[in-house]
Image (cartoon, grey):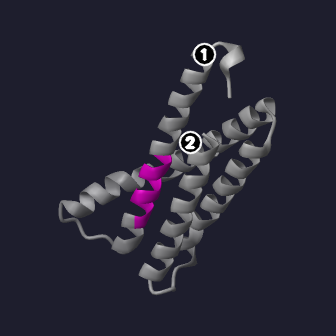
């Protein structure tokens, strides 16, 4: 999961830069996915270099941050659906960016949970 965390970190960095450029470089809050992506990339790198116990702690920290990020942005998915149905939004690019951010975090959390369940079912001797 360390590689997946690094990958999601890089994707979030790209999303943050794209959102910032998409807003005409006027909305510094569009860089929030970039900051979260940097944290994820750092946690992924730490998890790759850590002992199995530390890797487990680092990955649990990463999935907790992903879950908190998703919970904080989940409403944006509904806002995006409403925007697609024709409702006017004050900042459509921000709504799209935030919805993508939320969905990426949801996918990340689900992948981590699946990985944690799989690791829990494996015998201790065969753990990474």
Give the mark, 2 or 1, whose residue is nearer the N terminus: 2
Range of residues picked out in magenta: 97-106
Q: Quadrant of residue 126?
A: top right
Residue 58 drawn above or below residue 32: above
Q: Which of the numbered marks, if any, corresponds to residue 92? A: none
Separation of residues labelled 2 and 1 (CA atoms) = 24 Å
Q: Secondary structure at mark 2?
A: helix
Q: Horizontal and vertical percent for residue 103? A: 42, 50
Foreground pick, 17 / 122: 122
Q: Eyeballing the image, is 82 above or below 93?
A: above
From the top left corner, tell me how far across and down residue 12 is, in percent.
53, 61
Residue found 26% across the figure and 63% down from its top: 83
**Dominant secondary structure (helix, strand or loop) of the stretch shown in magenta:** helix
Determine whether, in the image, residue 47 is placed left or right of residue 121.
right
Answer with the quarter of the image where residue 10 lies: bottom right
Label of residue 67 in the image: 2
Q: Quadrant of the C terminus?
A: top right
Specify whether residue 72 is painted magenta.
Answer: no
Q: Quarter-wise, where is residue 31 in the image? A: bottom right
Above or below residue 106? Residue 77 is below
42 with respect to 88 (left or right): right
- 85 to the left or right of 125: left
**Where's residue 73, x and y in %?**
48, 53
Which residue is tagged 1?
122
Front residue of 118 and 76: 118
Q: Residue furthest left?
A: 86
Could you tell me which residue is drawn at 45 percent across and 43 percent down? Answer: 107
The number of discs equals: 2
| Numbered disc in front, either 2 or 1 | 1
Residue 28 on image: x %, y %:
57, 78
Going 61% across and 53% down the picture, which residue do you hit?
6
The secondary element bearing badge 1 is classed as loop
């Amino acid at each position: 999961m360390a590689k997946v965390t690094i990958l999601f970190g890089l994707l979030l960095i790209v999303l943050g830069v794209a959102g910032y450029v998409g807003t005409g470089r006027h909305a510094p809050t569009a860089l929030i996915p970039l900051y979260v992506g940097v944290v994820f990339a750092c946690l992924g790198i730490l998890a790759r270099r850590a002992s199995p116990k530390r890797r487990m702690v680092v990955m649990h920290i990463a999935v907790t941050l992903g879950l908190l990020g998703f919970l904080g942005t989940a409403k944006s998915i509904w806002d995006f659906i409403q925007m697609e149905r024709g409702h006017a939004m004050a900042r459509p690019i921000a709504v799209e960016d935030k919805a993508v951010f939320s969905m990426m975090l949801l996918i990340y959390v689900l992948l981590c949970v699946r990985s944690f369940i799989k690791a829990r079912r494996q015998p201790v001797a065969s753990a990474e």
